[in-house]
Image: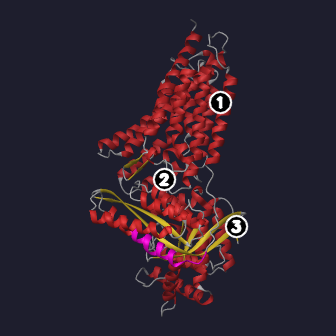
Amino acid sequence: MSERVLFHDMAAERLRRRATWAGGVLTAAVLVPYEVVGDVPQWIWSLFAELPFAAVVAALAPSLAGLSMIVAARVCKRPASLAVAIVAALLGAAIVVRLGADASAWEALRLPESLVRRPWPAILAMALAGAAANLTFQPHTRKAAAPLFAVSLVALVVHYAWPVRGQAPFMAIVAALGAIPDLPELRFQVGMVVLVAFAAFPLLAVGGALFHLRSPATRDQTIAGLVCTFGLPALLLLFVYRALIMGLAGAGVLATIGTAALLAAVLALLTAVVELVVDELAGGTTDLELPPGLPLPRAAGVAAAAVVLVVAIEAILARPPQKGVAWELHPATESERKLYGEAVLTWSAARRAWASREGQQSAEETVRMKAAARAMSAAAKALDPGLAAAIDTLAREGDDLDVAGRKFHRLVMDVNEAARKASVPFYLDPIVILSETKDGLRRTFRVTTYQIEEVRPVKVEGRAYATLHVKTLGGFGGHGSRLGFSRDAQPFALVVLDEIAAAEKQWKQSALGDEPTCLDTLAFSPAANMALRHCGKLLRRLSVEYSLREAIVTMTERHELQHQIDGPHLPISPWVERRLVGYAEPARDRANRELSAYLAEMTSEAPPHLALVHALPFALLARGGAEHHVAVMMLMALTDQKIPRAREDGVDDEKIGNAFDELSHLTEEELRKRAAEGWKAAFGSKLPKVSQ
């Protein structure tokens, strides 16, 4: 047997072995927690009914790809056909996961972060570099190493330079390095260094493999190739080891182990595929004794057709929810008021009291909850069959809810959809509160009832959207004192009129007193007090020249409508990147979305100076929250000042006051124009125009 044949047979056997064990690892991906909530694992099979079908398919895609590889390892006789089948399975799974992640992001909760980020350029770079290093061993494949290294470097550039939601990974690494000296403790600094090393690992691994361009390998599996293939998964396992020795073992550790195993499987498969395909293309197949089967071009064509079909089906399933759904209203009846204002709220309170006992419910609490559920169902039966069915399902299944609250959201939204179809002028909003206690994770589920006063459809560059003007029923506002709110999964945003009325009353009291201010008290620094007095004078003028209530409604409607327009995929603004470097992703995401909405509300028909009045107290007083960071970013950026990092906050009360003073002296059109230009600078495109 020639060395050429021996090398090919070894590559073919290695590919078949990896297809078997790596396919098994991918198949077992279904055993990795879908997510971890308060260290409680959430399994995909328990969430099938709560997720959009596209998200279910995406979550199962790695396992289905693994199963197809195991089958292909037995069915495909030709090694090249097996290689094509593996590439098709991985490519199809990657695209399906991406599409499913987009669909799930429009729901109440998202796919796991390990699935939704863009890892493929880095994975491709390491697989190509590892294979190229190994291929320098054989003379007939050595010439192919340089082009493979070149493609690997291109993939690295794409990985580090191509922004993910507005931020390039390379710039994130630079920002993280710059933030290390500002971190308060050594342990935080060490942790940031470790994260930077993890982010930079693909660059280091590929750089090490380039050594073999000048010094060919002395064996078919090189150390550099093994580092490219298994180095990053091993680094992930070091995080697991650290958690174990620190006594932090939990469901999150299981998820990390699963991620490391999946990463190792994918890298091992891709490396073996490249090695075998390059060997056949570079050395030809005339001197090889290949079993009968499809030639490589035909196998590639069949695989491509299968991938296109699967991706097309998932793309159809993953379409985002339709916005601007019409809700025809009729005058509220007494029966509807009793259902939504009494029966539903009584059931919600009884269920909350029953659930608070954590499995130690008394017979009396259980009877009370069941009685409230029966009363709620009975009240709905007299109104509409579809609404009655949805209410009955909520009552029947509402005592068996998953930790994350997906099922609760689905049950309540089904009630809302039934109410919309029946033209019932009431809306239920699900509230899920997760809190840590000494006894573990506590879940609180409740509903807030709103009466819909008006449905306002609008067009945004030709697309339909809508807002609901509502009043709270039952005296409980599930969102605190928020003037409005929006959910991506819903086809409309809400404007809460009674909260706006309370805000108008408070602002008028502050503005029309003997010493006008934007707050009820002045007990802060001299610079803050001066800014608040200036704000009070501006608020007094606005309250005289305009109807404050109408202005607040218009401003709030534009704010919440912008959340509907943005959705979950709004690019991360460079303002947020600078301000919140080192902050957790949820905090950055919330500040980013609020920044977009606050800038948008300044461009509405309401006096834009009212948005300044709203923002100033947050900038001066509410230190640390999303609204504080947004207010600081707005005031600094709209006056052409450098946005400081939150951890080294160089914004004092005097700077905030000066920025407020400059903006407050602009005319309405000048301020609207500056806000629109600021939105474009923050998010890289023109602010969408809204029309009735």
Closer to the camera in the image, 331 or 162: 331
- Circle number at residue 303: 1
Q: Quadrant of the N terminus?
A: top right
- Magenta stretch, residue numbers: 330-348
Q: CA distance from mark 1 to mark 2?
A: 46 Å
Which amino acid type is marked by label 1?
Ala
- Secondary structure of the residue carrying tag 1 is helix
| Quadrant of res 642 | bottom right
Which amino acid type is marked by label 2?
Gly
Residue visible at 58% across and 7% down?
A: 2
Q: CA distance from mark 1 to mark 3?
A: 43 Å
Which amino acid type is marked by label 3?
Lys
Closer to the camera in the image, 562 or 217: 562
Say above or below: 335 vs 437.
below
Q: Decide which of tag 3 and tag 2 comes sooner along the chain.
A: 2
Give how far across and how far down residue 568 sits, in percent: 57, 57
